[in-house]
């Protein structure tokens, strides 16, 4: 399906993009920039689901590497993703975009639990639905959460906004001759361990035939360009 004809997408942003130029945490001004990108995309009539990681605050693997129990550390990571979701909700609503946060770890005072049919209704009403806490279980990542929500919400594509403009055959920051793929298969991404998303997320997208669109979220206006079919990106597909 051409990008310009998509009706519903899931946008996955890693927590790190919320840091802006900081080394840690949330830069509210930069979150506002991201929210403007989402608003512009929404104004084209798209239905948008959002998943935001938590790596700008806490990653379970990092905690485990320092001796913490992995599952306990992962729950802390999931809580970090809820903070990011609330920051993005705040920015979007300041721009007049209606949103709902649904968390896979129930947190009644601050957001809804994940309820697919309710999420459907929010999207129909033009709200952006932000899915927090990944899949709600340790040993997973928000990439897997994004793939899962994209599948259950019947999204036409999973858009992965990163700091590079696609998938390369080698690291473009280290190798000047690195070549960007226009399209690449799920199989090649998995076999060559190309750093797109973690393997379980790629496999879930492959099994459900959800294209993964990798693009740079750091350039202003790029999300809307990609969605109109005029951007630079790599599409991971069969
Ligand atoms: N996490 C988890 N289960 C999930 C989603 C996330 O345990 O379903 C934890 C895990 O510790 C992870 C952290 O939350 O490291 C933050 O998520 P992620 O690393 O995916 O964030 P990103 O790299 O996208 O910023």
Image: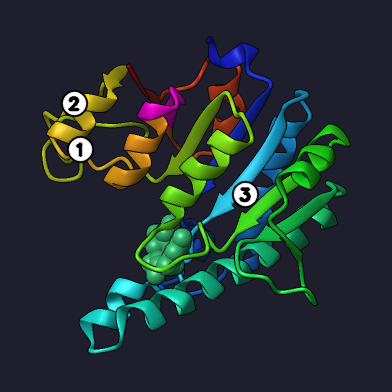
User: Is residue 212 in the magenta section?
Assistant: yes
Numbered disc in front, either 1 or 2: 2
For disc 1, the marked residue is: 194
Q: Are marks 1 and 2 in contact (CB under 8 Å)?
A: yes
Quadrant of the snapshot with the C terminus: top left
Region in magenta: 206-213
Question: In the rendered image, is residue 89 in sight?
Answer: yes
Q: Residue at x 50, y 43 (%)?
A: 148
User: Any atom of ligand 1 within 8 Å of the CB at mark 2?
Assistant: no
Q: Are marks 1 and 3 in contact (CB under 8 Å)?
A: no
> Where residue 34 is drawn, which disc sits there?
3
> Where residue 148 is drawn, which disc sits there?
none
Q: Residue at x 30, y 47 (%)?
A: 198
Res 188 quadrant in image: top left
Q: Is residue 81 left or right of residue 72?
A: right
Q: Position of residue 91 (x, y in %)?
A: 74, 58
First along the sequence among labels 1 and 2: 2
For disc 2, the marked residue is: 188
First along the sequence among labels 2 and 3: 3
Q: Position of residue 89 (x, y in %)?
A: 74, 59
Is residue 153 shown above or below 78? above
Q: Which of the two residues, 59 or 107, is positioned nearer the viewer here? A: 107
Q: Residue at x 65, y 66 (%)?
A: 28
**How far apart are labels 1 and 3 at the CA level?**
26 Å
Q: Position of residue 174 (x, y in %)?
A: 13, 45
Is residue 231 shown above or below 119? above
Label 2: which secondary element:
helix
């Amino acid at each position: 399906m051409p990008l310009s004809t998509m009706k519903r997408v899931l946008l996955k942003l890693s927590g790190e993009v919320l840091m802006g130029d900081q080394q840690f945490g949330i830069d509210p001004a930069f979150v506002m920039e991201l929210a403007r990108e989402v608003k512009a995309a929404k104004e084209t009539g798209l239905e948008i689901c959002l998943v935001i990681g938590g790596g700008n605050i806490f990653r379970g693997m990092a905690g485990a590497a320092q001796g913490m129990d992995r599952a306990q550390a992962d729950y802390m990571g999931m809580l970090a993703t809820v903070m990011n979701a609330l920051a993005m909700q705040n920015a979007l609503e300041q721009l007049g975009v209606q949103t709902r946060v649904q968390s896979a770890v129930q947190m009644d005072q601050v957001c809804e639990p994940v309820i697919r049919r309710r999420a459907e209704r929010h999207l129909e009403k033009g709200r952006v639905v932000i899915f927090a806490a990944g899949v709600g279980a340790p040993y997973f990542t928000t990439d897997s959460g994004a793939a899962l929500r994209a599948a259950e919400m019947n999204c036409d594509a999973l858009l992965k906004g990163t700091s590079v403009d696609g998938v390369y055959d080698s690291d473009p920051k280290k190798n000047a001759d690195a070549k960007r793929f226009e399209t690449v298969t799920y199989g090649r991404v998995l076999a060559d361990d190309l750093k797109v998303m973690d393997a379980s997320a790629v496999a879930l997208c492959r099994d459900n035939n959800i294209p993964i669109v990798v693009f740079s979220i750091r350039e202003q206006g790029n999300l809307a360009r990609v969605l109109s079919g005029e951007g630079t990106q790599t599409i991971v597909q069969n």
